[in-house]
Image: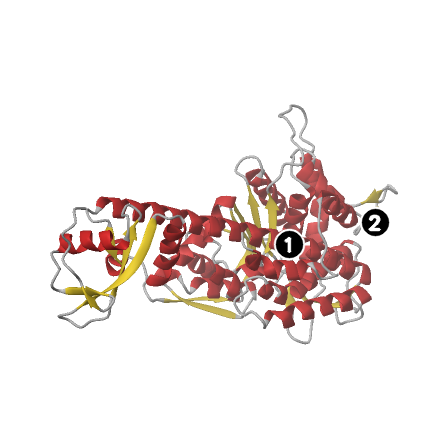
Amino acid sequence: MSTRKLYDLEFIKSHAMSKDVNKKDWKSISLKLQNLVSKKGDDGLEMKPIKNLYKYFMDTSDISHKMATTAILYVLSATTRRDQIVRSVQANKHLNLWVMLIGQSSNSRKTTTEGRIKKLLKSVMDHLPEEDDYRVNSITSNFTGPAIINVLEKNPRGYLIKSEASRFIKSFKREFNQELPEAMCQLYDCDDKVEYLSRTRDLETVDNPYVVLWGATTPYAYEHFTDDLFMQGFFQRFLFCLELEKERYDPLSFGEDISQKHKEFSSELLNAMRSSTIKTLEPTGTNTWINYQNYVRDVTMNSYEDERSIVYPYWGRVSEFVLKIAGILQLAKSSYLGIEGYGDTGVAMVQEQTLDLAIEIVQMYEQEFLALIKKVRFVNESAEVKTDRNILEQVKSYFFGSEERVLSHPDLLTNFDLTTPKMKPIIQTLIESEFLSFTYPVRNIQRGSAPKLYYVTESFANEEAAQCMWFLSKDARDKYKCDGKLCVPCTNEI
């Protein structure tokens, strides 16, 4: 891969605020999250519900700390409501997260994790009142393409788990579906009204949506991760989790499933979050937050030097991720401890500890995004190289298949349905490999047209021999001249 294709990734990674991430870092994050929320029970023992969440996902499943952290953040986000927000001058930030898990089939335990998410959230719904505002709704995932708008029209608020997101993303390429990514961005932003023209040109409307989205796919979906989906904002709204390495493997075992106990201990936290009366959350400024904002500013200002980068626009969203995660974590902590806000305002300040932890978490996901871009670019470039090699071999066969082995540039373009810019590097490769010996222009005397470019294979001893073969095959002695001179009929044997 060319260095040029990695310039924006290297710019981000060279910044002092950016840091390489390894497995130990994710384990460290999980420990900080486990200790964030705790209180003494009636029996005097300390209760840590987020620690129970980690045990629920990891004790009987061999997923990584990174994947468990992603699942827990998703569950906590799915338990929030549309009216629980982080307040900022620019705009209120809702607490809905969108995450995309990319992992190998079977080994990454995508299905296992999704199943546990569903069971846990269902247990929250079963313990809450029937009122819609407090129930955790499951949005059906049995749809393709623009049908999501129709689904949300009937059920606009809840959590959505799209087990195989690649088909959904692939559908964006269809002409009638090209406006769907924009509508999805509006759903993420929780616009008061999202309108979408269906394939039959019927206007569909989603009022007051609140969608918490979990997408999962395999690395084979990279080819559908097109530049426009990054640049237009769709993929900018996701936290990516690449579960591409196996940290541990648990063989099948028998005995008691203790995940049920962990689920029960975790449900108290989720129930408290869902029914909390806290309406808004407001962050306090910290040195870490100020430094992070300066870092985001540096990246954003640099982005104007290259308007085609698919990397820089992501950093227009990272501060928003921080506020969302900080709000979710503070809501979890305040509701579990019974803190209902200050005075009659119902406002709970995001504490410095929570905000700094949210920044640290988002920095981890920034590295996941950079890793994703590198993989997507590698796959797309490999596909381009593979295509070029195929065409290269086909061009060679085309030359060998012609009797004279001298072909015109227009003939090549027509035969392979290519443009000149696409054909030019292929011809250059053939010349450098000495498959083609030389090229020459030929002008039609009768028509007075511009010269056509002709390519000659290496099988001829010299250019004169190649010209003779071509003119003899075309019986064109009296119609053409080469380099401004009349061609002499060839009498030599080829």
- Residue at 45 percent of width and 57 percent of height: 148
Residue 24 sits above or below residue 418 on the image: above
Q: Are marks 2 and 1 in contact (CB under 8 Å)?
A: no
Work out whether residue 358 or residue 198 is closer to the camera in this orientation and state it. 358
Kind of residue indicated by mark 2: Lys
> Label 1: how many residues lie within 10 Å, few (<14), some (14-19) or many (20+)?
many
Work out whether residue 279 or residue 228 is closer to the camera in this orientation and state it. 228
Residue 211 in sight from this viewpoint: no
Residue 312, position as x, y percentages in the image: 60, 65
- Residue at 20 percent of width and 71 percent of height: 449
Residue 435, position as x, y percentages in the image: 34, 47
Residue 413 in sight from this viewpoint: yes
**Image quadrant where residue 27 sits:** top right
Secondary-structure class at tag 2: strand
- Residue at 13 percent of width and 59 percent of height: 476
Residue 82, position as x, y percentages in the image: 61, 63
Residue at the disc numbered 2 = 39
Kind of residue indicated by mark 1: Thr
Residue at the disc numbered 1 = 79
Work out whether residue 240 or residue 415 is closer to the camera in this orientation and state it. 415
Secondary-structure class at tag 1: loop
Is 334 left or right of 403, judged from the image as shown?
Answer: right
Q: Which mark is residue 91?
A: none
